[in-house]
Amino acid sequence: MSRYRTLLFDLDGTLIDTRKGIMNCLRHTFDSLGLPQPDDPDRFLGPPLPYSFREFCGMNEEETSEAVRIFREKYSGEELFNAEVFSGITELLDALKERGYVLAVATCKVEKFAHLILDRFGISRYFKVIGGSTGTRVTKAEVIAHVRRELGDPDISQMLMIGDRDNDILGARAVGIDCLYALWGYGSSDEAREYGASAAVRTPTDCLVFVTTH
C-alpha cells in the first residue's frame, strides 16, 4: 500500500495544457501596455501572475495591477478554454479514484477560473477540493495550506503535491509535503533537480506507478 493517500494536483501544465490561451493573453497584455514582448514567456507558465510581472518585468505595484487586469480581462473572455487535457490524465485520475486516493487541485490560477476550466473539460468530478488563488490567497504554499484545511487536515506525511514548476516544489516544501515533478508539463529535469523535487516522472502512466508503489 502506498504511503500517499491524499494527492494534490497543479492545474496549468499538469492536468490541463493551457499554454495557448496564456501566451495569447501575454502578447495582448504587453501590446496593450506598449511594452516589448518578454524574451522568455514560458517563465510566466506556473507562478502567480503578480509575481511574474514584478519579478520578470520589474513592474511596480501599480503597473503590476494594470497588467494583471488586462491579462485577466482577455483570459476570462475568449482564452479561458483555449486549452486541452493532457493525454493520459483522465486515465490517471480514473485509476487513482478507483484505488481510493483522495484527489484535490491546488493551483495559483484564480479559483473561479480553475472551477470553470475543470468543469468544461469534464474532470472536476474527480476532486474533493479545488483550491486556487483569491484576493488574500496568492502563493502556492497558501493555496496548498488552504486545500489541506478544506480536506480536514490530513496527515502531511501521506500527502503528495504533483506539479510541473519550481513553485510547486517550493510551495509543497513550505507546507511540509513531498512534490512529484510532472515532466510532461512546462518545466524541465534541470528545474526538478535544482529545486529538489522528491522525484520526477515523464508521463501520467509513470505518475500512477510512482504513487502506487511509494
Image (cartoon, helix red, strand yellow):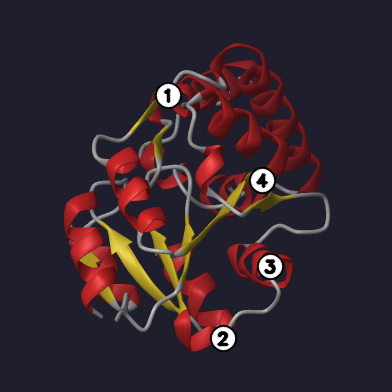
For discs 1 and 4, the disc positioned in front in the rendered view: 1
The residue under label 4 is which amino acid type?
Met
The residue under label 3 is which amino acid type?
Glu
Cα–Cα span, label 2 and label 3: 17 Å
Residue density around tag 1, few if under 14, some if 14–19, many if 20 or more, within 10 Å: some
Cα–Cα span, label 3 and label 1: 26 Å
| Disc 4 and disc 3 in contact, CB within 8 angstroms | no
At 68% from the left and 28% from the top, the residue drawn is 72
Residue located beneath label 1 in the image: 83
Residue located beneath label 4 in the image: 59
The residue under label 1 is which amino acid type?
Ala
Per the image, label 2 sits on a secondary structure element best described as loop
Residue density around tag 2, few if under 14, some if 14–19, many if 20 or more, within 10 Å: few
| Sequence-earlier tag: 1 or 2 | 1
Q: Is residue 108 above or below residue 156?
A: above
| Disc 2 and disc 3 in contact, CB within 8 angstroms | no
Cα–Cα span, label 4 and label 2: 39 Å
The residue under label 2 is which amino acid type?
Asp
Residue located beneath label 3 in the image: 142
| Sequence-earlier tag: 3 or 1 | 1
Cα–Cα span, label 1 and label 4: 28 Å
* Front residue (pair 62, 120): 120
